Image (cartoon, helix red, strand yellow):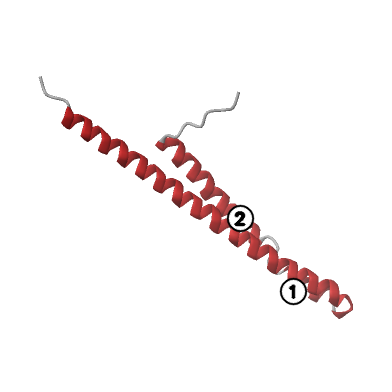
């Protein structure tokens, strides 16, 4: 039997925080190979030129990918928080509407 997804403001905030953490970790991962290309050039010299260029290119691609992952996670966190605010707003609005329809005794 499939699991039921329960949408609550608390869950939306919990998932937004997880996306914030993912965004942060992706940003950290981008810096993990920072300077690798230059380091390889300095330690191996021109004799390993082709490999050195490949390391530099890989570092550039990794940094770009991590940046995109970080941005996507940040964007998702913002959307989850917007959904939370909308959910809470609709809940309050519907409660007000119901209160207007109920007659005081």
Q: Is residue 44 visible?
A: no
Judged from this view, the residue extending furthest toward the front is 101
Q: Is 33 displayed left or right of 46 in the figure?
A: left
Judged from this view, the residue extending furthest toward the bottom is 46
Q: Name the foreground residue: 26 vs 68.
A: 68
**Residue 38, which numbered label?**
1
Q: Name the foreground residue: 28 vs 78.
A: 78
Q: Residue at x 53, y 44 (%)?
A: 18
Q: For numbered disc 1, what is the local secondary structure?
A: helix
Indicate whether 73 appears above or below 12. below
Which residue is the site of mark 2? 26
Rendered location of residue 96, percent (x, y): 21, 35
For the image, the number of numbered tags is: 2
Q: Residue at x 69, y 69 (%)?
A: 60
Q: Name the foreground residue: 100 vs 40.
A: 100
Q: Residue at x 60, y 52 (%)?
A: 25
Rendered location of residue 36, percent (x, y): 74, 68
Task: Give the CA distance from mark 1 to mark 2.
Answer: 22 Å
The image quarter in which residue 90 lies? top left
The image quarter in which residue 62 lies? bottom right
Q: Work out which quarter of the rendered image holds the C terminus and state it.
A: top left
């Amino acid at each position: 039997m499939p699991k039921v997804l329960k949408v609550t403001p608390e869950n939306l905030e919990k998932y937004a925080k997880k996306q914030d953490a993912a965004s942060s970790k992706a940003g950290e991962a981008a810096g993990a190979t920072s300077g690798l290309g230059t380091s390889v050039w300095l330690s191996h010299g021109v004799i390993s030129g082709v490999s050195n260029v490949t390391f530099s290119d890989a570092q550039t691609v990794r940094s770009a990918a991590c940046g995109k992952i970080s941005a996507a996670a940040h964007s998702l966190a913002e959307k989850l928080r917007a959904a939370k605010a909308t959910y809470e707003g609709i809940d309050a609005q519907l409660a007000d509407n119901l209160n207007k329809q109920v007659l005081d005794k």
